[in-house]
Image (spheres, rainbow, N blue to C red):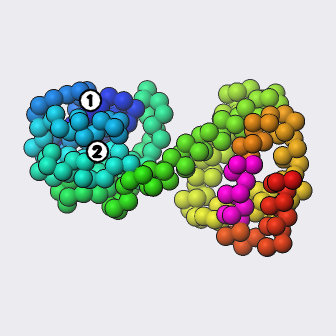
Amino acid sequence: MRVTIVGRGRVGRGLASAAKRADLDVKLVRGGTEGRVRGALVVLAVPDPVVADVAAKLEVRGALVHCSGSLGVEVLRGRAPSVGVMHPLVSFADPERPPSLRDATFVLDGDDQAVKRARKLARRLGARPVRAQVHGPAYHAAAALGANGAAALAAVAVRVLEAQGMTRRDAERAMGALLRTVGENVETVGVPTALSGPVIRGDAGTVRRHREALEALDPGARRAYDAVGPAILECAREAGLDPERAAEVARALTE
């Protein structure tokens, strides 16, 4: 199966690199390509706002899918014999060092032929294909909360560690390794069981000391702690935290 990827940004280059490592017949072309594009599967890896415009300029004989999590199949209707969505739940941060796609989830939807070919590609890349009609703003928001939220909180944590004398690189490696264990826990034991730390233990005293220390060292970090605190507490309640202890933690987060 020949695969043509349209778009030379982070996602396009990351997918193309993974496809080459898997010995696939893959071609990477610019997002501004016009006219006939060959390939049993053509993948649009372009920014969300231009998916429809780019698709309109192409002539695709095979299956056509886009990689946008915030858009559904409808944006491609009439642009190819078979259309769909193939959204990799993957963080493509550095096109020169694309992440491993091993066991990553590719969420698929669309016509049977497009889904069949996208599923084949995902499996050849070592990913886990899941067919579900979920693409859209809410689905994309969930992905953004998990990925971008984690990256932003990691940046705050790195800043706090660096302020106390750790080198930035050591702090980044430490937080990266910590987040990997969190990801493994979410994948293996699920949520809310993956939650750990003082909130799940109902340790209001430690929460107070956290906030005091952060206020003295980095008030911005304390605000980030306070912003995510209610979500952590809600997760702890779902995991079975005693109501009285939950109330104590709630007070510690606002006092």
**Dot 1 alpha-carbon crowd within 10 angstroms: few under 14, some 14 to 19, many 20 or more:** many
Q: Which residue type carries mark 2? A: His
The answer to whether residue 29 is above or below residue 123 is above
Q: Which residue is mark 1?
A: 31
Q: Residue at x 78, y 42 (%)?
A: 222
Residue 152 drawn at (x, y percent) = 62, 39
Give the mark nearer the N terminus: 1 vs 2. Answer: 1
Whether the magenta-drawn stretch holds residue 229 is answered as: yes
Q: Nearer the viewer, residue 118 or 220?
A: 220
- In the rendered structure, does residue 93 fall within the stretch colored magenta? no
- Tell me the kind of residue under disc 1: Gly
Image disc number at residue 66: 2
- Residue 37 seen in the current view: no
**Residue 100 image position (x, y, % from top left):** 45, 41
- Which residues, given as a range, are shown in magenta? 226-236
Given residues 138 and 91, the one toward you in this image is 138
Give the quadrant of the N terminus: top left
Q: Residue at x 88, y 44 (%)?
A: 212
**Mark 1 and mark 2: Cα distance apart in space:** 12 Å
Closest to the observer: 165 or 33?
33
